[in-house]
Image (cartoon, grey):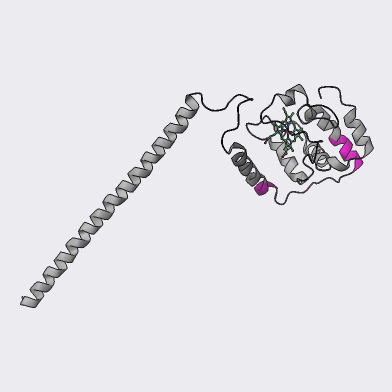
Amino acid sequence: MTKISLVYSRVIWKSAGIEESHARVKLTMFKGLILGILLCLVVMFAGVYFYFAGGHAPVAVTDPMMPMEKKFAHMALNARIEKDTAKLQSPIPIDEQNLLAGADTYKDHCAVCHGIPGREKTGIAAGMFPSPPQLFKGTGVTDDPASETYWKAKNGIRLTGMPGFKDHLSDTQLWQVSLLLANADKIPDSVKQSLAAAPAEH
Ligand code: HEC
């Protein structure tokens, strides 16, 4: 071996050694990072667990909302409904007959929580959390497409008290009541009278 090639091979050896130690430092950093993430997760889970197990979570109807509870719940719900109802359209027309049938369904299954036009909230509605919106007050759900109301009536809204009527009402009944609510601000007198004839606490 010549002198030059000896020196050269030493340089290669040295740089290989440096690279190796670099790789080792990188590996240690990576391990540290993973450990840090795992530790964070454990602490977070423990925090959430003790929050719920320790009786700190708001479970009474009168408790205040959890931070951002409404925002997150609505974000999840809206995203799901948008996904499910993108191409959904009512298979029945908005006519008096369907609106009257919708009013019957409403009186029997919805009014106790969502109210009758011009009446006070029922005791049941007043004692719920979240509070059931009074669908004939203000805009109600007239600003939502009927398909959104149909989805909510069919599937319900978890952990809110809003029942899903999928197995209890026919598809036609679900659309009839949804059309009624989507047009609650422009219903004919016959439908108004039908709603007004609902028994008390309904
Ligand atoms: C036992 C009470 C109860 C009954 C009965 C009930 N709901 Fe509800 N409903 C609720 C509650 C509570 C909410 C609010 C949920 C929330 O805050 O996300 C709700 C929400 C809704 C919404 C969404 C309103 C909005 O502003 O987006 C619609 C639409 C709806 N209900 C339709 C119906 C229809 C149609 C029926 C009858 C077929 C019905 N509900 C029966 C309790 C009820």
| Marker count (numbered) | 0
Quarter-wise, where is residue 170 in the image?
top right
> In x, y percent, where is residue 122?
78, 24
User: Relative to 39, is 140 on the left or the right?
Assistant: right
Question: Residue 83 magenta-drawn?
Answer: yes
Q: Residue furthest right?
A: 190
On the image, the x and y values in percent for residue 74 come to 64, 41
Q: Position of residue 94 (x, y in %)?
A: 86, 45
| Residue 20 spot, x, y in % from top left | 21, 59
Magenta-span inclusion, residue 180: no
| Residue 41 sits in quarter | top left
Tell whether 48 sits left or right of 3.
Answer: right
Q: Residue at x 74, y 34 (%)?
A: 133
Q: Quadrant of ligand 1?
A: top right
Front-most of 97 and 10?
A: 10
Position of 191 with respect to 90 (left or right) is: right
Residue plotted at (14% across, 66% down): 13
Q: Quadrant of the N terminus?
A: bottom left
- Start-end of magenta stretch: 82-102
Residue found 15% across the figure and 65% down from its top: 14
Say left or right for 193 vs 131: right
Residue at image coords 71%, 41%: 151
Question: Which image quarter holds the C terminus?
Answer: top right
